[in-house]
Amino acid sequence: MSRVLILYGTTDGHTRKIAAALREALRDEGLHAFVTDAKYGTATVVPEDYDGVIVAASLHAGGFQKPVVRWARTHAAQLNRMPSAFLSVCLGILEKRPEVRRTLDALVERFQLSTGWRPGRIKFVAGALPYTRYNWLKRWIMRRIVAKAGGDTDTTRDFEYTDWDDLRAFARTFGRRLTTQSVRLQHEEFV
């Protein structure tokens, strides 16, 4: 049975929830899926122990979590030789303006250049606005940013924008490709 690592970085906790949903969807496909927060214990987490790797990180202030960047840089050579995917969790993907999409693409490209890892699949996933968990300054800043984009500005509640069905479909597709590849390799060993 194939083993999949889901390594994530989170600032406000939503990417942790996305990683858990990926794990459940992969398990539904019959794979062993393991979730690890990049800021804890990644020294012993190596891609070689898995058949595929999904990395999810949220975009904040023009960059991804540093532990995710360090881990991907350290393991880029192995990641480039195996099935892998990178999920960029961000609210910007909800914007329909082409210049916003170009900016998001450029930030992911910068991540790839700084790490040396070229994931087999890159997916943008809409995140969340947990206004009630922000301190007053972050709440004020986020409200101003979101207002400019025409988004939800009621700071008395939280908003979640992740398309869970799409995320599960992504996980199923990744899992099926991994399973198909594994079966093909096993068949080649016996031929």
Image: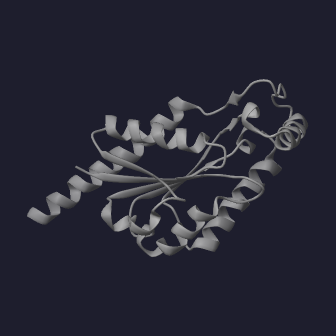
- The quarter holding residue 77 reads bottom left
| Residue 71 coordinates in the image, percent (x, y) | 52, 67
| Residue 103 coordinates in the image, percent (x, y) | 77, 56
Can you say which quadrant of the picture contains the C terminus? bottom left
| Residue 37 coordinates in the image, percent (x, y) | 50, 53
Residue 103 sits above or below residue 174 on the image: below
Colour convention: one colour
Task: Please give the name of the residue rendered at 39% of the width and 67% of the height, measured from the top-left corner.
Answer: 44
Residue 92 sits above or below residue 159 on the image: below
Give the side of residue 48 with respect to residue 112, left or right: left
Task: Please give the name of the residue rendered at 30% of the width and 53% of the height, measured from the top-left corner.
Answer: 3
Residue 156 sits above or below residue 59 on the image: above
Q: Is residue 176 visible?
A: yes
Tag count: 0
- The quarter holding residue 157 reads top right
Give the side of residue 141 with respect to residue 89, left or right: right
Q: Relative to the observer, which residue lies in front, 67 or 114?
A: 67
Task: Please give the name of the residue rendered at 28% of the width and 50% of the height, measured from the top-left corner.
Answer: 180
Q: Residue furthest front?
A: 135
Q: Is residue 117 visible?
A: no
| Residue 1 coordinates in the image, percent (x, y) | 22, 49
Q: Relative to the observer, which residue lies in front, 180 or 133?
A: 133
Residue 105 sits above or below residue 131 on the image: below
Task: Please give the name of the residue rendered at 52% of the width and 58% of the height, measured from the top-left corner.
Answer: 38
Give the side of residue 60 with respect to residue 150, left or right: left
